[in-house]
Amino acid sequence: MRITVVGTGYVGLITSICLCEMGHAVTNIDIDDKRIAQLKNGRSVIYEPGLQQLLENNLKERRLFFTIDPRIAYAQTDLIFIAVGTPENPDGTANLEYLQEAVYAIASHIEKDVIICTKSTVPVGTNEKIAEMIKDMTPTHLNVSIVSNPEFLREGSAINDFFLGDRIVIGTEDEKAAAVLQELYAPLNTEIMVTDTRSAEMIKYASNAFLATKISFINEIAAICEKVGADISQVADGIGKDKRIGSSFLKAGIGYGGSCFPKDTKALVQLAGHVDHPFELLEAVIGVNNRQHTLAVAKAKEAAGELAGKRIALLGLAFKPNTDDIREAPSLTILKMLIEENADVIAYDPAAVLNIQSIFGNEIQYTENINEALKDADLAIIATEWDQIIQFPLVQYEELMKTPLIIDGRNCYSLSDIERHSITYISVGRSPYA
Ligand code: UGA
């Protein structure tokens, strides 16, 4: 089977490379010639553990091809995965411009029967619109099937998630197309669900909205724990052991970020509004998350007073560990607030420094070395739980900082470890230690 994947972003590139690993030949197309040139040269355009090696292997095996030419990508292919971005419009709705461009290019170039499978996160009803667009543009003798196949990959563990996901959702009214996809995915040994198209589209939004809800819920419980003297890590552990609740996504912190939860929750609120059902619960989830992004600086001010002129080490910039992605990262809000306060900031991250630098330029200093960040600092704020930070010896905070004061937005350290040091430690949902 000849497979084409549209888009070399997160989902597109991971899908292409993992399908190659399963033994398929895959053509990955993008409109960005620079990205394609870089990928042809064997250099990944995204940071994802393990991906670079798989890219090199599959190029060498001649299973993986990159192109900007729609004729090469679409004319004779059997199966097309659309994995282009659906970024946020200013009003929170999903921007379907790239998707429409991709569908237009596909419709203009296909010469044989084909299955088009949408991996991009799209509002309910979009795949039906794709079907109409294709029908209007392609010769009637061509049989084009449309499938919604939402993606549940997490950045940082995307390859593992592709091969060992919890489920694969195939949304289509076309039984033959569903059978082709079931066969394609069968070797993964993951439960495959076949649903109608609209339900598959909804599963994606509802999954991300539910996970975001869990995070904002635990963050609210954490705020109350601080007031009543309970410990959020014990509370999360205790409620998570109830199988009906589950232990994952109960890690309190300074809020979720990334390219998915913020965008998809807003898009679902918009979608619900359009069908006259205001999604009040999800609106509150978003509100709580916005507040969480400001929490570290609020706590810093409470603990250290005026921040102007203070040297502040911001440890962790990526929206989560193992990625250089800073989209909607809490660090962006933290940096804006610190700059407004006229603090003297030095920002550390093992992977995301260049991305942050492209936004904040010389308004702050940067380092890829924790020791350098902490040297003579009045205060350290932890925004991402990188292993490098979790494993960093606490004694070094005492030795390097002017005043060892840590605002830990990700609860990286246990309170029993902290107690052995002369550090003022303020975390999330746990009693401060001074
Ligand atoms: C998320 C979903 O987990 C994937 O299933 C989905 O495919 C993806 O969005 C998408 O729609 O493409 P991702 O954004 O890569 O994946 O990252 P997550 O690991 O889910 O983390 C999202 C954010 O939640 C991070 O900022 C993380 O720090 C935060 N988080 C996560 C918490 O604050 N607490 C938790 O307990 C878990």
Image (cartoon, rainbow, N blue to C red):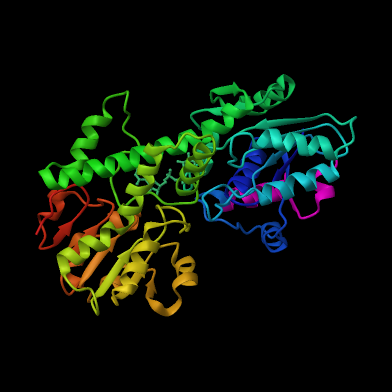
Q: Looking at the image, which residue sits at the far top?
A: 175
Is residue 424 placed above or below 51 in the rendered structure?
Answer: below
| Residue interval drawn in magenta | 52-75
Residue displayed at 40% across by 78% down? 363
> In this orientation, which residue lies closer to the viewer: 4 or 206?
206
**Horizontal and vertical percent for residue 184?**
67, 28
Is residue 91 placed above or below 26 in the rendered structure?
Answer: below
Q: Is residue 236 left or right of residue 285?
A: left
Please identify the quadrant where the C terminus is shown.
Answer: bottom left
Residue displayed at 89% across by 31% down? 140
Q: Is residue 296 something that shows in the picture?
A: yes
Residue displayed at 36% across by 43% down? 285
Please identify the quadrant where the N terminus is shown.
Answer: top right
**Splitting the image into 4 quarters, where does residue 369 fall?**
bottom left
> In this orientation, which residue lies closer to the viewer: 79 or 254?
254
**Horizontal and vertical percent for residue 333?**
37, 62
**Horizontal and vertical percent for residue 371?**
29, 70
Is residue 186 placed above or below 356 in the rendered structure?
Answer: above
**Horizontal and vertical percent for residue 174?**
72, 22
